Amino acid sequence: MLHILRGGLNFGLRDPWADAKGWNRHASAFVSAQRARQADNEEAWHITERDYAKVYLQNQAAIIFGDVVATGTSLDFALGSLLTYVEAQGRIIE
């Protein structure tokens, strides 16, 4: 389960998934991604805070995430971070 921090914990996906799969059969990953408007273009956004990440995946993992997508900037950053980790670790996402 990928939690994109600032709003991702608000969806409460962890408890129902734990009930369905068991507490020891799933893990949570966390990536912080705070977005802000770019100074030179009010229509463009960038990530200003990305300091926290706790990502661990088993050899094969299905990713479940919830987030409020306004601009897509945080989601794009979080998924890019996850893919970088997956490639570096030789993991597979289904």
Image: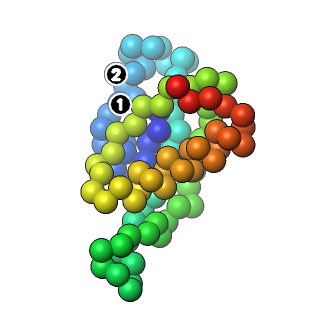
Query: Residue shown at 63%/47% (left/top)?
Result: 84
Q: Is residue 13 above or below residue 48?
A: above
Q: Is residue 61 above or below residue 7?
A: above
Picture coordinates of residue 76, whole percent (x, y): 45, 53
Left or right placement of residue 77 versus residue 56 in this view: left
**What is the number of callouts on the image?**
2
Q: Is residue 47 above or below residue 23?
A: below
Q: Residue at x 31, y 60 (%)?
A: 71
At label 2, the amino acid type is Pro
Residue type at mark 1 is Leu
The location of residue 82, given as percent across then percent down, is 56, 44
Q: Residue 16 bears which disc, if any?
A: 2
Q: Position of residue 7 (x, y in %)?
A: 34, 50
Q: What secondary structure is marked by label 2?
A: helix
Neighbour class for label 2 at 10 Å: few (<14), some, many (≥20)? few
**Residue found at x 46% / y 66%:** 47
Q: Is residue 26 left or right of residue 36?
A: right
Q: Camera-side residue: 1 or 24?
A: 1
Is any atom of residue 57 visible in this view? Answer: yes
Residue at the (61%, 23%) spot, across then down: 60
Residue 47, disc: none
Left or right of residue 24: residue 11 = left
What residue is shown with label 1? 13
Q: Quadrant of residue 86?
A: top right
Q: Position of 37 compared to 80: left or right?
A: left
Is the Cβ of the residue at disc 1 closer than 8 Å to that at disc 2? yes
Cα gap from disc 1 to disc 2, whole angstroms? 6 Å
- Across and down, in percent, residue 5 comes to 42, 51
